[in-house]
Image (spheres, helix red, strand yellow):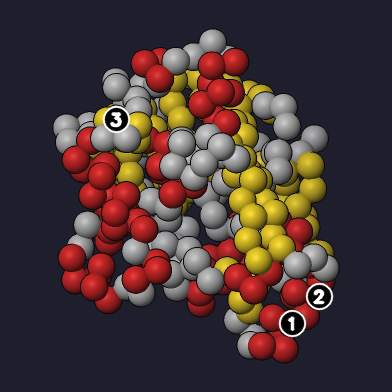
Amino acid sequence: MDQQTRRFGLYEVSILHDGFYEAPIDVLTHAAGPAARDGAIAAWGRPTLRIVVNCFLLRGPGGITLVDAGTGTAWGEAYGHARTALKSLGLTRESIDRVLITHLHGDHALGLFDGEAAYFPHARVLVPATELSFFTDAEKRLSTPENRRGGFAIAETLLRLYPDRIDAIGTTGDVIPRVTLIPLPGHTHGQSGYLIENGGRDLLLWGDAVHLETLQAADPEVGLVFDLDGAVAVATRRDILGRAGDHGWVVSGGHVDGFKTVRRVGDVFELVPAA
């Protein structure tokens, strides 16, 4: 897949393809219960999920910014291609001035690490404050199912390898010029997106608010077992699809193929390629 690059306001934004995530179809959930889940599985029509994994490069004020960092080498040779994409654009790990994290899951944050070293030696790492607070809380770690604790380990490593280069960020003011944080909880408690101002044709990079762009736009109650709070994830997904459609935003995310816009179709939605 080729990089896709467009200008949004102050920034030239490139999609960096990191790999494809594959999982058995039984990771699907549905808020309405087993029968609705069976319907979603039938609508998908295949025994496995295969979805793109992206991160994003922003060139603009203050230098070079990444939104998420991909997987690096942590998930094997099928992933980590965002690093190659950076090199093809003439950039090195030393070129990156900052990384904006949407949430602390492996396909978004493990690319920050190079074994027991920081992969980006000069970058500051900006993490939603709610996300960082949750994944550094020992009591919340104990109350989270063991197979959903990956974010705690990532936060631990982040604090160790970038000890003086982490900023916890909120919704007050710009994160960087003309870029604001939009809370999108549910998939994780502090997951957030980044809205890049572009004179009304803004770009929202929404992390994992939507994993399955066709299925979840048509039925926002479809979720994945990886959502820490499935009910909140459904409400967030329906809300952000509606807001993006109403405002005419362009959207993309960790698992969206290219730049899209959101179209209302009755009570549900459709993602279509952005003009």
Please give the residue where the numbered disc 3 appears in the rendered image: 118
Considering the numbered disc 1 on the image, is that residue within a helix, a strand or a loop?
helix
Residue 213 on image: x %, y %: 70, 56
Q: Could you say which is closer to the camera, residue 26 or residue 89?
A: 26
Quarter-of-image position of residue 89? top right
Vertical placement of residue 60 versus 159, above or below: above
Would you say the residues marked 1 and 3 are in contact, meaning their CB atoms lie under 8 Å apart? no
Question: Can you tell which mark lies on residue 38?
Answer: 1
Residue 209 on image: x %, y %: 55, 58
Considering the numbered disc 2 on the image, is that residue within a helix, a strand or a loop?
helix
Marks 2/3: CA–CA distance: 43 Å
- Total marks shown come to 3
Instruction: Let me know if residue 10 appears in the view.
Output: no
Considering the numbered disc 3 on the image, is that residue within a helix, a strand or a loop?
strand
Instruction: Let me know if residue 22 appears in the view.
Output: yes
Q: Amino acid at mark 1?
A: Asp
How crowded is the residue under tag 3: few (<14 C-alpha within 10 Å), some, or many (20+)?
Answer: some
Q: Amino acid at mark 3?
A: Ala
Would you say the residues marked 1 and 2 are in contact, meaning their CB atoms lie under 8 Å apart? yes
Q: Could you say which is closer to the camera, residue 232 or residue 106?
A: 106
Question: Can you tell which mark lies on residue 42?
Answer: 2
User: Left of 167 or right of it: where is 202?
Assistant: right
Quarter-of-image position of residue 9? top right
User: Left of 265 or right of it: where is 233?
Assistant: left
Marks 1/3: CA–CA distance: 43 Å
Residue 273 on image: x %, y %: 79, 42
Looking at marks 1 and 3 on the same chain, the residue that comes earlier in the sequence is marked by 1
